[in-house]
Amino acid sequence: MDQPGDEQMNKQSVQQAMWRRCADFHGHVCGGLTIGYKAVLRVMELLELYFSPDEDVVCITENDACGVDAIQVLLGCSVGKGNLLFHITGKNAYSFYNRTTGQSVRLVLKPLPEGMTREQSFDYLTNAQPDALFDVKPATIPLPERARIFDSYPCDACGETAGANWIRIQDGRKLCLDCAVRYDRFRV
Ligand SMILES: [Zn+2]
Ligand SMILES: [Zn+2]
């Protein structure tokens, strides 16, 4: 028999389990992890996303901080699958894409109230509703193509094999990035 409030309690225990998975994966709890966790809760509502066993969910993160771990563990956006990409601006901002529906969104953390200690900001983030924490904006980066598979070639200098997209041609030889002499006249 359904009591009023059952659904709410169920949602709470699901979210507690999700938070525990974040903490286990990340190794500790912190404000940064909380930001990523809340971003996931928010985008799950907005784009009807769930854990992605393949590449259907894509995240482009604008930072490489603690919160990204929540996105990896809860949404299955990971470096290895190629559906976690980096566009580093140092902002607490994440773009999410749902390949199935074609929908996307960019979440940007709103400025936190000033003058809080670390503990206070952790409490603030923990208690805030996900929809109060983020500005919801359109994703500006087009949906990236699916991860590609490239041929691989042995490096003509060291003999080690690397994917074609990482090989450089120098003096007619195929070289890995470690053996190729870098040429970048925009980085002096
Ligand atoms: Zn952390
Ligand atoms: Zn080499």
Image: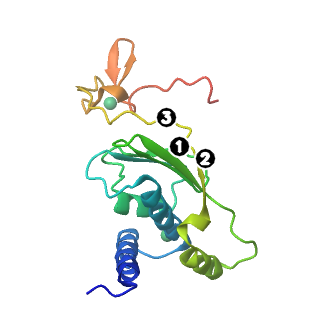
Residue type at mark 3? Pro
Question: Residue under circle 3?
Answer: 142
Label 2, on which residue? 89
Q: Nearer the viewer, residue 59 or 1?
A: 1
Name the spot of residue 76 as percent of width and height, x first. 33, 56
Residue 188 in picture, x, y percent from top left:
64, 29
Mark-to-mark CA distance, 2 and 1: 6 Å
Q: CA distance from mark 3 to mark 2?
A: 17 Å
Residue to which mark 1 is pinned: 87
| Between 117 and 131, the one nearer to me in the picture | 131
Residue at position x 59%, y 57% in the image: 92
- Identify the secondary structure beneath mark 2: loop
- Whichever of labels 3 and 2 marks the residue nearer the N terminus, that label is 2
* Amino acid beneath label 2: Thr
Query: How many numbered marks have been drawn onto this rendered protein structure?
Result: 3
Please determine whether, in this image, residue 107 is positioned above or below residue 13.
above
Dots 3, 1 in contact, CB < 8 A: no
Q: Using the numbered discs, state the Cα–Cα distance from disc 3 to disc 1 in whole angstroms.
A: 12 Å
The image quadrant of residue 16 is bottom left
Q: Please rate how many residues cluster around mark 3, counting C-alpha atoms within 10 Å: few if below 14, some from 14 to 19, many from 20.
A: few
Q: Dot 3 lies on which element?
A: loop
| Left or right placement of residue 59 versus residue 56 in this view | right
Residue 34 place in picture, x, y as percent = 51, 70
Q: Mark 1: which secondary structure?
A: loop
**Badge 1 density bin: few <14, some 14–19, many ≥20, Cα 10 Å:** some
**Do the residues under discs 2 and 1 have CB atoms within 8 angstroms?**
yes
Which residue is at 72% across, 71% downward? 113
| Disc 3 to disc 2: CB gap under 8 Å | no
